[in-house]
């Protein structure tokens, strides 16, 4: 694991990039809106990408500026950091493997999209690998699925009421509820699989760290 100064540098970069990405994307969304501002804001904050990037940015800010506060302690937990890592990995994968093929933003919007879906995931993954201790990482990843499941329920309910869905694979109006529920089940499996893989990798990294610390050459 890296020293405290390098960890803080990582957190500063994540916080700065997150703030820029979120504000820039919000600005572009508002100036290009075709619906009222309030509806635009609801739509903007209904994207999983935006919510996860806000959480990751909040995590960096709290760990930097109020590590001993309630939120600072919460976001400092390896289980919370690891769950956020899984979320932002999924954000990046879905965008780059699925949505990038049907979405062609330009100018500032493209820059914002790259920050949200490529830069921020890359930074936070590196932070998880090099700047966190995995010693207390547990296998109880079922808790990590609560937020994605609540989000999926929100999207389906909101879409049923308004006809608006943020992602085409969640659009029950076009796909039907059976297909959407199947897609949701598939995503749950993806989230669970990546969560277990991350824990396995974390335990391997923790073991490697232990071996390095206990190496005779370091004593």
Image (spheres, grey):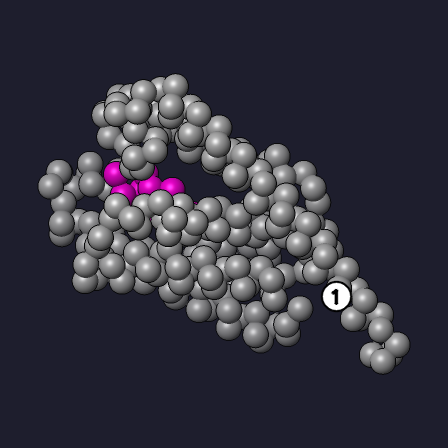
Q: Nearer the viewer, residue 66 or 32?
A: 32
Find out whether residue 50 is within the magenta segment.
yes
Quarter of the rendering occupied by the N terminus: bottom right
Horizontal side of residue 206 vs 175, given as left or right: right
Find out whether residue 124 is within the magenta segment.
no
Q: Residues within 10 Å of mark 1 (few under 14, many from 20)?
A: some
* Rendered location of residue 66, percent (x, y): 53, 59
Residue 178 quadrant: top left
Farthest residue toward the left?
34
* Rendered location of residue 2, percent (x, y): 63, 72
Residue occupying image coordinates x 61% and y 34%: 142
Q: Which residue is mark 1?
A: 209
Q: Which residues are magenta?
A: 43-52
Residue 208 quadrant: bottom right
How many marks the image carries: the answer is 1
Q: Secondary structure at mark 1?
A: helix
Residue occupying image coordinates x 34% and y 33%: 169
């Amino acid at each position: 694991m890296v020293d405290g100064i390098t960890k803080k540098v990582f957190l500063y970069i994540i916080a700065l990039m997150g703030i820029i990405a979120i504000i820039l994307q919000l600005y572009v969304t508002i100036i290009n809106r075709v619906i009222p501002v309030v509806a635009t804001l609801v739509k903007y904050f209904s994207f999983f990408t935006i919510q996860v990037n806000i959480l990751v940015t909040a995590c960096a800010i709290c760990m930097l500026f109020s590590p001993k506060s309630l939120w600072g302690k919460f976001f400092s937990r390896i289980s919370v950091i690891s769950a956020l890592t899984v979320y932002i990995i999924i954000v990046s994968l879905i965008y780059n493997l699925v949505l990038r093929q049907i979405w062609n933003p330009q100018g500032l919007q493209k820059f914002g999209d790259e920050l949200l879906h490529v830069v921020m995931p890359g930074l936070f993954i590196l932070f998880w690998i090099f700047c966190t201790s995995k010693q207390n990482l547990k296998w109880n990843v079922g808790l990590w699925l609560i937020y994605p499941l609540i989000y999926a329920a929100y999207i389906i309910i909101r879409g049923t009421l308004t006809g608006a869905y943020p992602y085409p694979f969640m659009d029950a109006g076009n796909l039907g509820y059976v297909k959407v529920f199947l897609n949701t089940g598939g995503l749950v499996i993806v989230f669970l699989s990546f969560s277990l893989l991350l824990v396995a990798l974390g335990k391997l990294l923790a073991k490697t760290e232990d071996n390095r610390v206990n190496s005779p050459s370091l004593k």
